[in-house]
Amino acid sequence: MKNLPENEWMKELEGRLRNYEEQPDETLWGAITQAVQPQREAAVWRWIDYAGSGAVILLAIFMLSIGGEKSELVLRDAKKAKNQLPTKNTTTASTQSQNALTANTIEAASGLLEKKNERTNSIQVRSQQIVFSDKKSVENCILNTSLAPPTSELNNSGTTRSEMQTIILDSLFNQKEYMRIDTLVLPAKGDEEKRTKEKKQRKAVTLYGHLTPSLSYYAMQPLANDEIAISSFNSPSVLSGDRSGFAGELGMQRKLSKKLMYTVGLTFYQQQQTIRYQTVSSSKNQIMNSASESFSYSIIPQYNQHIVSYNMTNVGVTAGFLYELKNAGLIHRIGLSGSYQQGFRKSNEESTYNNVTSSYAFYNVLYRIEYPINTKLKLYIQPTYSRGFYVNEKLKEPFSLKPARAGISVGIVVDF
Amino acid sequence: MSRHYDIFERCKKNDPQAQRLLYDFFKSKLMGLCRRYAASHEEAQDVLQESFIKIFSKIHQLETSEKLESWMKSVVVRTAIDQYHKQKAREIIFDRIEEKAFKVEDQVSSLDTVTDEFLIQVVNSLPAGCRMVFNLFAIEGYSHAEIAAMLAVTEGTSRSQYHHAKMLLKEKLKSETLMEYYEKLA
């Protein structure tokens, strides 16, 4: 064969191949858009992921910084109060006989006071802290190629694909034996599909929502310098209905890794509680002259009852992490989150507690048990303990409160 | 040109309508390109799908619309090469085509008498390595050095693969009448 014809048929072949056009299947565009659409969504979700993770980190930083500052402040105040108490109480007792005095008898006389004190030594002064240290109930209340089968199948049916190829080619060549592909092993797509599935699952959007009946507890911190002695708090039992509250949460959770996911959501909390406490009256103490000794007086303290309407309706945001511990039928997760809530309930003018100007930050420890109802829906129960670490509360009472809540959430998780 | 430019700019903004227009405009050409590199129609569709996904996700990297078509073709070629590497990594076994079984004497007398589809089928029947080198060298115009880099082979291998591809094609297209036609011309 000479060079010229070979070059000619090669050139013709190249030219025709270069200009070859063929219509793809109509279904191809659908497949492309399906793949492109998630990319667009992925860009959006990537930003949501960043925002969610950022919210969690910021909340964590907020929790650490505020919690630390608050602890320091409490410690400083406690030390300060401790240093001031003896002097203050002695002075107060010798002049007006009012604050923090739970003793029933004070012997006093103008001219013989010192002598009497030395002799009887019967003045009993208790600090305000002692009053509260007796309230165990108060202390105790602190408390989520496209058709190819997998390799294993190919071993059994490897010729199926080649046969298919042969059939296609035969049909294209009018069933004449132009060519034959004896063995053609196509790539196993099983693993890739599995990886893609896992990737999709990781990227899947999951919404959750739950309702939480809860019980509220408070760590009460008396104000040290207000010269008011609180004699007792009405402390309902641990499981009392007086402590009941109700919370709701709706949010989104996304996997960060196989076992770790973050949650971001909106929270709602409502409670209607009444706090009762008793103070020692500063002006209505009854002073009785001792009949036996002319300069001896007995003071009988009078008590005032106080009722605080502690009703709140809070709305806030929450963010946290859930770690999967076990997935065997039931899915067990442990979680830690932080939430910030702002009060929205307007109080009347007489009320000493103004919810609308109050705000709270909590950290939440939770344990979630999920039961898959189907591939898209899971039901879960979630015991949760929440502890307030930052309280900016408008409460005109001689104490401050640090809330803690315990509840069991019942909710659903929906995959999209 | 302005329409082309408009589609290009809108595609850069992920406009679905513009993406559909771009797809409709180039799908036949690019499918033809894919058909040369892939071993089958299905595989070509996979390559085309993957290529358009890359095109839509990376079109914003292209500054002007003037080089759009050549850029799209290069994306398709690179995707086909990626596909080739994946197949190679999975140790796909392509047995050599039994050359002696190839008979075309009954209906082919010249390239004018055979359809484009037939020629594509002939190219498709080449072993993967040969097919890649043939397409890259003979049709796209890459040098053997470039091909060697793209396919992670030596330049010598690229040359020998091309030579082998040519010989196989010649065998496949060889028929007495066909060659007689060219020999008469000579």
Image (tube, helix red, strand yellow):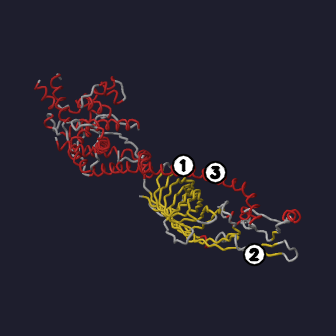
Which residue type carries mark 2?
Gln
Give the label, 2 or 1, closer to the camera.
Answer: 2
Q: Mark 3 lies on which chain?
A: A
Judge the density around disc 1: few (<14), some (14-19), many (≥20) Cα neighbours within 10 Å. Answer: few
Q: Mark 1 lies on which chain?
A: A
- How many angstroms separate mark 1 from mark 3 (CA)? 16 Å
Residue B176 located left or right of residue A84: left
Residue B58 in view: yes
For the N terminus of chain A, give its image quadrant.
Answer: top left
Reading the chain from its start, which is encountered first: label 2 or label 1? 1
Identity of the residue drawn at 61% across and 66% down: A397
Q: Looking at the picture, how far across and down is residue B137, in whole percent? A: 26, 28
Quadrant position of residue B180: top left
- How many angstroms separate mark 2 from mark 1 (CA)? 53 Å
Q: Do labels 2 and 1 share a chain?
A: yes
SS for callout 2? strand
| Nearer to us in this view, A206 or A154 | A206
Residue A210 in view: no
Which residue type carries mark 1?
Ile
Give the label, 2 or 3, closer to the camera.
Answer: 2
Reading the chain from its start, which is encountered first: label 1 or label 3? 1
Q: Looking at the picture, how far across and down is residue B128, in whole percent? A: 32, 34
Task: Identify residue for label 3.
Answer: A72
Task: Identify residue for label 2.
Answer: A286
SS for callout 3? helix
Identity of the residue drawn at 31% across and 34% down: B127
Quick check: marks 2 and 1 in contact, CB under 8 Å?
no
| Nearer to us in this view, B169 or B108 | B169
For the C terminus of chain A, give its image quadrant.
Answer: bottom left
- How many angstroms separate mark 2 from mark 3 (CA)? 41 Å
